[in-house]
Amino acid sequence: MAQFQKPLNITVLSGGPDAEAMISHKSAAAISEALRTAGHHVNEMDLPTDDPSSPLRDIPQDHVVFPALHGPWGEGGGAQSQLVELGLPFVGFCPDAARVAMDKNQTRVLAAQHGVTIAAGSVVHRGSPPPCPPPCILKPLDEGSSVGLELLHTDDELANAINHLTGPALCEAFVPGRECTVPWVLGQVLPVVEITPAAGLYDHEAKYLRDDTVFTVEPKIAPEVHTALEEATTRMAASLGARHLGRADFILGPDGPVFLEWNAMPGFTASSLLPRAAAHVGIPLPELTDRLVRAAHAEGPIMPIR
């Protein structure tokens, strides 16, 4: 961590209208504590579920914003658009890039265009014919933290799930293999983390409600697979126009890494993966958050597109 730099004024955002507000609160608490440890002046702002944009107008112009928000509005362009309009520098993706990163199908399209392997599948709506036979994965297009993720084993399960959709979803062929994630911070790929749930999928419950999921930083994988993971993550970051931080999730299938999705604002809870990877290479959370807010401060506000 830089030792003799002037402390910054930071506003850390949490809450908001999204399903992951509880996780957002945990991330924000960890980020705020780390930033205070790094010497910064931190204000915490919990956004309401209704009209979450209104409190943003009270953020002073000399603050850097760290939006510890997870979900379609907080992570997918809504909050970012408001921060741009208010002329506030902030950590994370620009609004347009955030919208693309939040949409699992748009990231699939980008992956395929840039030579990153994806599973067979497509967007489905209520009553759509299945794009691939079971077993397959069904998940909402624009939720994070595996909210609404389902593994469907039979034709009846798949048809029933599609017939009960309340919005568009992504249906992909299930690829068996080891699940790995690759964090990306300020243009650098951090160590690979393997995720091994005690049972079933690495779903929302395994992420946040259980304590028996095993996380292995720098797992034993073949050198060529490790290289493929890093290259795919770098390609996705470039294609998305990634800014400051993110995380690419993969399954190590029989034929190599298969891209699952990109997380534009990874969690900062006690079980979160990006901070684990950073700590493994000697970047503790105070230093990690310090680097991120200083990068945002140095870049300044994003100019709105008129």
Image (spheres, rainbow, N blue to C red):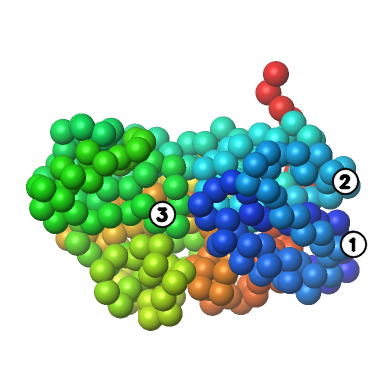
| Spatial separation of the CA atoms under disc 1 and disc 2 | 18 Å
Q: Nearer the viewer, residue 83 or 216?
A: 83
Height in image: 142 above or below 287? Answer: above
Residue marked by disc 3: 147
Query: How many other residues sit within 10 Å of disc 3, few (<14), some (14-19) or many (≥20)?
Result: some
Picture coordinates of residue 283 (x, y %)? Answer: 63, 73
Q: Going by the image, does 288 lie left or right of 258?
A: right
Query: Relative to 216, is 289 above or below?
Result: above
Residue 277 as seen in the image, left or right of residue 290: left
Marks 1 and 3 close (CB-CB < 8 Å): no
Counting from the top left corner in percent of width and height, residue 91 is at 68, 50
Residue 62 vs 228, above or below: the answer is above
In the image: residue 44, left or right of residue 214: right
Asked if the residue at tag 2 contacts the one at tag 1, i.e. Cβ–Cβ closer than 8 Å, the answer is no
Q: Label for residue 6? A: 1
Q: Residues within 10 Å of mark 2 (few under 14, many from 20)?
A: some
Report how far apart the C-alphas of labels 1 and 3 lie in the structure.
40 Å
Inter-mark Cα distance, 2 to 3: 34 Å
Above or below: residue 61 compared with residue 247:
above
Place of residue 108 in the rendered image (x, y in percent of width and height, measured from the top left): 34, 40
- Residue at image position (23%, 46%) is 161
Residue located 73% across and 66% down the image: 32
Which residue is identified by label 2? 60
1 or 2: tag closer to the N-terminus: 1
Residue 99 position, x and y percent, is: 52, 36
Q: Residue at x 14, y 56 (%)?
A: 153
